[in-house]
Image (tube, rainbow, N blue to C red):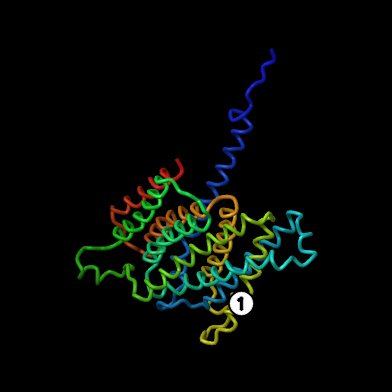
Amino acid sequence: MIVIQNVGTSSPARIRRQWVKRIQWGVLLGLMVLIYGSHAPLITLTKVEGQVPFNPSSCVVMIELAKLLISLVTLVLSGASSALRAPPPLVLVAPYAVPAILYALNNNLVVLMQAYMDPSSYQVLSNLKIASTALLYSVCLGKRLRPAQWLALGFLMGAGVCHSYSSLDLGDPERADTEKAPRLHITAWGLFLVLVYCCVSGLAAVYTERVLKSQKLPLSLQNLYLYVFGVAINGLASFSSVASEKSFLEGYSGAVWLIIAGQAANGLLMSVVLKHGSGITRLFVISCSMLVNALLSWATLGLQLSPFFLVPVSMVGLAAYLYYI
């Protein structure tokens, strides 16, 4: 009798590859959480007398241009630049215009909303995109979620609510008025913008995931198509804006360039998640970044946190456990 050893799931090489893949995903997601959570505090740090000193539209154009250039370099280095020698069919490229339009709208909304709320309120309320994305993910992509997974997403929403409560100072109003620390605040116009932002964000994520997975093309080439439209659309929006009194690069500082670099990296990493993972993973990144945002706001802006802050931290951890078990 010939006995063949089982080299399947217990193979050391296979186990090693699995651990390497897990570590790579862990580093990627951790970096995204850090970048995503630091975005609003960085914008706040750039403000001069309560106003953003740079042209928000130009900042979005620079982010899209950076992603385009990185995608082009990646395509060339991967040896797939032959795809650029002939014009691609219009039917192949046209679908990438839709997410470019949606992302262009959302990128401008992110900056615009900062004038109507504080960074933590933005980060908390933007978690409404969990509901919009999950519903669109289930309906448009036909992905059926288990009851435990819906419960996990509910915990993510609850974590946002608890975080909002933990950030409120319910102590002495007179003492609060004399403190210089940032307070939670949001206007009716800010709430409307948040709702629009969450709906558009969910639609953009679901549509982009569908396009990236439906076409068997290198991710760098798909990113190139996406960001060509991104640069064109945002460029037109920027140069056609007659209301702005700032020149294209006016008010740019080290923090602004850091925002551009971070958001460009985050956009490229998000395309990896949507191509090889799912839009639900994106929701967990958003929720974890909410906690990072609060910690950074506490460290850099003096935002006050209460012990109740540990509740949303625990809820996010429980949600991750329920969803991925």
Q: Work out whether 178 lies above or below 214.
A: below
Identify the image quadrant of residue 215. Answer: bottom right
Count the marks.
1
Could you say where residue 137 lies in the image, as x and y percent from the top left?
49, 56
Looking at the picture, tell me which residue is in the foreground, 304 or 308. Answer: 308
The quadrant of the rendering that contains the C terminus is top left
Q: Work out whether 152 lies above or below 239.
A: above
Q: Name the residue under label 1.
A: 235
Q: Work out whether 101 lies above or below 152.
A: below
Looking at the picture, tell me which residue is in the foreground, 178 or 219. Answer: 219
In the image, what residue type sits under mark 1?
Gly
Residue 196 left/right relative to 23: left
Identify the image quadrant of residue 254. Answer: bottom right
Could you say where residue 13 lies in the image, as x and y percent from the top left?
64, 32
Circle 1 crowding by C-alpha within 10 Å: few under 14, some 14–19, many from 20: many
Could you say where residue 281 lies in the image, as x and y percent from the top left?
50, 52
Residue drawn at the location 54% of the way across and 48% of the way down? 27
Identify the image quadrant of residue 292. Answer: bottom left
Residue drawn at the location 69% of the way across and 15% of the way down? 2
Residue sticking out furthest to the top: 1
The kind of secondary structure element at disc 1 is helix
